[in-house]
Amino acid sequence: MKLILTMHFDEVKKNPDVFRVLLQERHMSRFCHFQGMSRFEGLPRFIEEILAEGINSGKLYPFDLKIITVAIFGAIEALMRRYLLELDEKGHSPILDNAGTEILKLFWGGLTREES
């Protein structure tokens, strides 16, 4: 999952204008046939498949796949928007540099420390 997130965020950094358009036009049906849009829309399905595989193999405890998939994808979208905003305002943004790792830490480990 970390590799997928890292690859996705690297692609955003390489092609910010493409992702700017995708984020702005995502809900308009006339763009759904656009190749980049279909790749972008396929990400939630891919995330859900990875999570389902983890549950089925016993590596992840059972949870509502739809809710967690939407939460992870929402985090990805929010980070992309923040990256593009900072890029426009400052000309650069480091926010995606560790985004994959931080998303996984949040969803895999939570925010609380384990009690010994």
Image (cartoon, grey):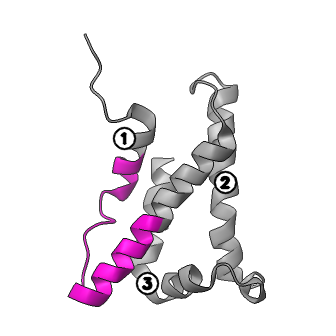
Q: Earlier in the sequence, mark 2 or mark 3?
A: 3
Q: Residue at x 64, y 26 (%)?
A: 62
Q: CA distance from mark 2 to mark 3?
A: 22 Å
Q: Earlier in the sequence, mark 1 or mark 3?
A: 3
From the viewer's perspective, is 107 left or right of 87? right
Magenta-drawn stretch contains 81: yes
Position above or below: 17 against 61: below
Q: Which residue is mark 2?
A: 46
Q: Residue at x 35, y 57 (%)?
A: 99
Q: Which residue is mark 3?
A: 16
Q: Position of residue 21 (x, y in %)?
A: 55, 88
Q: CA distance from mark 1 to mark 3?
A: 25 Å
- Amino acid type, mark 3: Pro
Q: Earlier in the sequence, mark 2 or mark 1?
A: 2
Between 90 and 39, the one lying in front of the other is 90
**Residue 65: which numbered mark, if any?**
none
Magenta-drawn stretch contains 85: yes
From the viewer's perspective, is 80 left or right of 28? left
Q: Position of residue 11 (x, y in %)?
A: 47, 73
- Amino acid type, mark 1: Lys
Name the chief secondary structure element in magenta: helix
Position above or below: 62 against 97: above
Crowding near pointer 3: few (<14 within 10 Å), some, many (20+)? some
Contact flag, marks 2 and 3 (Cβ < 8 Å): no
Q: Which residue is mark 1?
A: 105
- Furthest residue in direction top, as rendered: 116
Image: magenta residue range: 78-103
